[in-house]
Amino acid sequence: MSQIIKGLNIPVNRVEGDLEVRVDVVDHRIDNAWSAGTMFRGFESMMVGRGPLDGLVITPRICGICSLTHLSAAVTALDSITGITPPDNAIRLRNIALIAETIQSDMRQAILMYMADFTNAQAYRHHPLFKEAVDRYQMLKGTSVLEVIRKTKRLIEVIAIIGGQWPHTSFMVPGGVTSIPDTAKLMQCRLIIEQFKEWFESRVLGCTMERWQAVSSFKDLENWLGESPCHRNSEVGFFLRFAWKAGLDTFGRGTDNYISFGNFPFPRHTGVVPLNQINDKDEPGKRQNLVLTAPGFATGITPRPLDPTKITEDVSAAWFEQEKTTLHPFDGITRPYASGSSGEKYSWVKAPRYNSVPAETGPLAEMIMDKVPLFHDMIQQKGASALIRQLARMVRPASLLPAMGTWLNELMTHRDAPFYTSVKSIPDGEGAGMVQAPRGALGHWVKIKNRKISHYQIITPTAWNGSPRDKNKHPGPWEKALKGVALKNLENPVEAGHVIRSFDPCMVCAVHTLKKDGTPHKKFHTGWTF
Amino acid sequence: MQDRIICLGNRLKQEDRAGLQVYDRLFKRKLPQQIELIEGGISGLNLLCFLENVATVVFVDAISGFTHPDGVVVLTRHQIETASQCLHYGHDAGVAYLLAMMPRVCTPPLPRDIFLVGLEGQCSEKTIEHAADIAQDMVQTGKYGALPKHLHYQTGKIY
């Protein structure tokens, strides 16, 4: 007789913000999953009626990890409304800072969040690599944990140098940037990036970035792993060995639809080549509107051009009301509506859809749009999985670091060129800032009327990945990815955690209040009460 | 060497914004030159760089479960570290995680004194102002050795 458990709550700790995942389990296998954002965000409503530039100050404060990306989306929307293309140097500076933020996020997520689960003794004490995993990833003590914090702490100094303020810089403004780093500061950035690159190659990859880029198939990956102890003992090598043994390549497939908004627009003059042109020599090489990581939508591994008009938000299962169930973000509103229709509506996250279907976003989607052969081959052979998704995030810096270095060198060569084109005021109009944040596709849709913000809609990467069901009852990407996952121990469902964390969830409204363990509201006798 | 007041919290969440309301009060004041005021927000680990080359650090943040609503509590470094077992990466770990990582990853000299001025829940204007006074006093008087006896803190000691 089947054992059926309805409504099991999956504890997903270490997630930024408020996430609740509920599953039905039949014979230790997830039969159905529901992902709920448990808090109304409502940032969009705060924006209406404010001055056009207020988005540059408010939206970066939505998230402590990718605040710069929100700034980028906000300023891109305003650039679009003004119709001004920022000067080349401004584009280079913006890109360098954004890449620094993306890479620090990738490395911290991998070592501090994802691999931390490999130290789960209840699940993995019999895994042959368990002891080594503890040595590397144990909280506060693991060798890799300490190293990644030291290295990323140094890397984000690049943002402080470029932004002229840290944290909460607002150095990106319509028309360009507000700071012009002198040559000494640019040299300092170059040193930091070079040192980070050396560490990334020696410890994360275990080989040069060029050697890694030559790994172009699943077979190549197996050969690469066996080629050298440096490869096997690198973070990527260890991750692969542990994850394969734990079966992370066998579950967590998802919807097979992928979306990326692309990122890092090119200056008019640059030596950087778009990643999809590096990976596919037949990709057209026109020099207009080029970006480093390509935008697109893909079913399986076939990318197609992105049509922003096909993006909608569906509120069928979200506690919001609007005139139609699905609306484009230029038309959508954020009006909370706790209907009480429990079961049908279950999340404070709307369901973004592309051409009416759910789509996964993040580094794996980028690898597909950029036609990275290794990931195309892995998906063709076995389909997406928690392992592939996480691997894409770990190795993404290998694609971004070279461009970062080139743009920095170009800045030093062209430092006397402009960094800002004057923008006297923001005219009435509408514009979208669609960028690729560390966790995936991020969009700000903005309308300005009578010199005030009349409309602001934000779709975050986690809204794509952690979306609830839509009017067609299609589950969101990680709801779908959880279906079929076998749970060895219902008290310790680490497999579900691997799947959800491979999407790198971030509910963008993080709470970090110091909470005293134990009974709340008791006087803290060893402190001073005023 | 400088002292720092680092105000934490999320302006966009009512129950987590008290630290930044204190920041706004302090920002309007003329603070002595040796005090650097930082809007730390929800920057988490990205604040580690502010724990280097500094004499005294006073964090100001919303707290939960320490005292009555609208109350203010001052905690030592040790009290912060032992108040929460939530010492993993993530925003819910906050100051306790930051302080646990500090000696392991930061470059000396590290702060001689670290305190937290904690505000319980959503606070009144009066309490916000009071907390701003306390934060400023703690840095200033600590600097010049004029701290009242009952406020002579020793890092790591439980009072």
Image: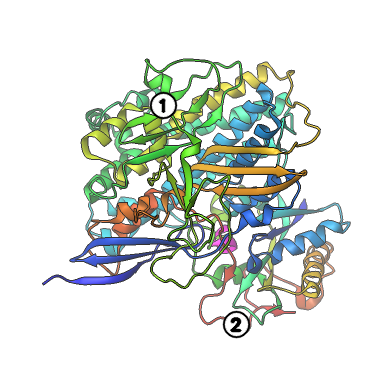
Quadrant in the picture for residue A267 = top right
Chain identifier of the residue bearing label 1 in the image: A
Circles 1, 2 touching at the beta carbon (< 8 Å): no
Circle 2: element type: loop
Q: Position of residue A122 (x, y in %)?
A: 28, 64
**Front-most of residues B93 and B107:** B93
Chain identifier of the residue bearing label 2 in the image: A
Q: Position of residue A273 (x, y in %)?
A: 49, 19
Badge 1 amino acid: Met
Q: Does residue B97 belong to the magenta stretch? A: yes
**Image height of A308 relative to A62, above or below:** above
Q: Magenta segment range? A: B93-98
The residue at the far front in this view is: A323
Question: Disc 1 or disc 2, which is closer to the eye?
Answer: 2
Same chain for the residues under marks 1 and 2 in the image: yes
The overriding secondary structure of the stretch rendered in magenta is helix
Residue located beneath label 2 in the image: A521
Please tell me which of labels 1 and 2 falls first in the chain: 1
Quarter of the picture containing the N terminus of chain A is bottom left
Q: Position of residue A252 (x, y in %)?
A: 29, 50
**Figure disc tally:** 2
Quadrant in the picture for residue A491 = bottom left
Q: Residues within 10 Å of mark 2 (few under 14, many from 20)?
A: some
Residue A209: give its label: 1
The residue at the far left in this view is: A1
Q: Position of residue A423 (x, y in %)?
A: 77, 31
On screen, residue A179 versus residue A485, left or right, reads right
Which residue is at a point 70% across and 64% down the rendered structure image? B19
